[in-house]
Amino acid sequence: MLEDGTIFRGHAFGAPVEATGEIVFTTGMTGYQEAITDQSFNGQMIVFTYPLVGNYGINRDDYESIAPTCKGVIVKEHARVASNWRNQFTLDEFLKRKNIPGISGIDTRKLTRILREKGTVKGMLVQEKEDLNHAFDQLRAVVLPTNQVAQVSTTKPYPSPGSGKNVVVIDFGLKHSILRELSLRNCHLTILPYQTDAQTILDLNPDGVMLTNGPGDPKDLPEVLDMIRGIQGKVPIFGICLGHQLLALANGADTFKMRFGHRGFNHPVREIATGRIDFTSQNHGYAVDPSSINKDELMITHLEINDDTVEGIKHRHYPAFSVQFHPDAAPGPHDAVHLFDQFMELMDAWKEQQNNA
C-alpha cells in the first residue's frame, strides 16, 4: 500500500510481519544479497526491477553487513529454489532469519513508474485481512526517522589489523566491501563511530581518513561537518557516497533530495579531466547541488552522464576528494576500483610533502 492509496496485491514471503518505510527501486540485475545488506537502505523497502530475484540464494561472501536494516523486499518473482555452489539458504529463509518481510507477484514495472513520476513515497506491507482503511490512516501518519546513521554506525571503535598504511574509517553505515578493498592494499584499519571528534582521529596519527557511505539526509549530521573541517588539511581524506555529501557540506556546498535517486549497478559516470567513462554502482537519494559549490575551494571531478548529477569533487587546497558512487562495487562493475589506488598515492604524496616541509 502506497501513501497515495495505491494497492498492490501479492504473496508474502520472508518474515511474517508488517512493516512501513520509504519505497525505493534498484536497477541491478544481480546483487540482491549485497543490496539487502547495504545499510544505506536503512528504513527503506527495496523494489527490485529485475523480474527474478533469489535464484542463486544467499552465501557467505556477499554480505555488506551482518544485520541488515531495510524494511522490506518487493519483487516480481522470488525463486523458491536456489541453485549455486556457494548457496547456504534461500532468500525466503534469509529474510525470515533477519525478520524482514517480502512481497512477490506484483507489477514491479508499474510500481517503479509511480516512483519515477511521483518520487519516493511511504509504503506499507500489510496483511489483506487487516482493515485497509485503518492501515492507510496509519501509513499517512508515519513520520520517517532522521537518525538512520545512529542506527547503523558502530557504537565502539574496532580494528582490522594490517601491516601497511594506517587508515581511520569513519563508519556512517559502511559496506564491508570498502574494508575489503582497503585490506587488499594492506592497510591497517581503525573503524570509528560516526560522532568521533577530530582530535580523537588525529591522535591515532592516521595516514588517511575514509568517510564511508550511509543512509539518510547528510544535513541530519551537523556535528560531522565540524569533524571534517577539523581534519582536512592535516590528513588525506577519501569520501564515498554519504561521505562525499558530507565533505561537500563541510566546505560550504549544499545538498538536495533527488526525486527517486540512483540505485543500481549501471550508472555511467564521466571523469571530467580525462573523459574516461566508468559504469558505477550507486545507492543514494541525495546529491550535491552544483550551483552551490565554491569553485575557489572545490572542483567537480565527475558527472553522471544521464542527468549531470555531481558524482565527484576534489578540494583545491587540501588532500581531499570524494565520489558519489561506490568504487568498491559489490557486486560490480569494478570500473572505478582504481580510486582506492588513487587514495594510496595521495597518502604517499602527502607524507612525502610533510617530510620535506
Image: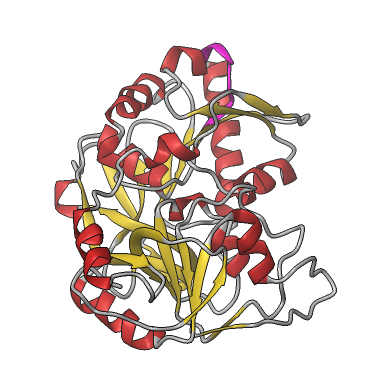
Residue sitting at x 34%, y 65%: 124
Q: Is residue 23 left or right of residue 194?
A: left
Residue sitting at x 19%, y 62%: 137
Residue 65 in sight here = yes
Image x and y of residue 47, in percent = 43, 73
Asked if the magenta segment contains residue 317, the reply would be no
- Asked where in the image residue 260 lies, by quadrant, the reply is bottom left
State whether residue 329 is above or below residue 51. Answer: above
Q: Nearer the viewer, residue 82 or 300?
A: 82
Q: Quadrant of the N terminus?
A: bottom left
Image x and y of residue 154, in percent = 55, 32
Q: Nearer the viewer, residue 28 or 8?
A: 8
Residue sitting at x 39%, y 26%: 232
State whether residue 176 is above or below residue 27. Answer: above
- Asked where in the image residue 41 lies, by quadrant, the reply is bottom left
Q: Count all numbered tags in the image, as a single digit.
A: 0
Residue 336 in sight here = no
- Asked where in the image residue 123 lies, by quadrant, the reply is bottom left
Residue at far left of view: 291
For the record, the magenta segment spans: 202-209
Image x and y of residue 235, in percent = 48, 24
Image x and y of residue 187, in percent = 70, 34
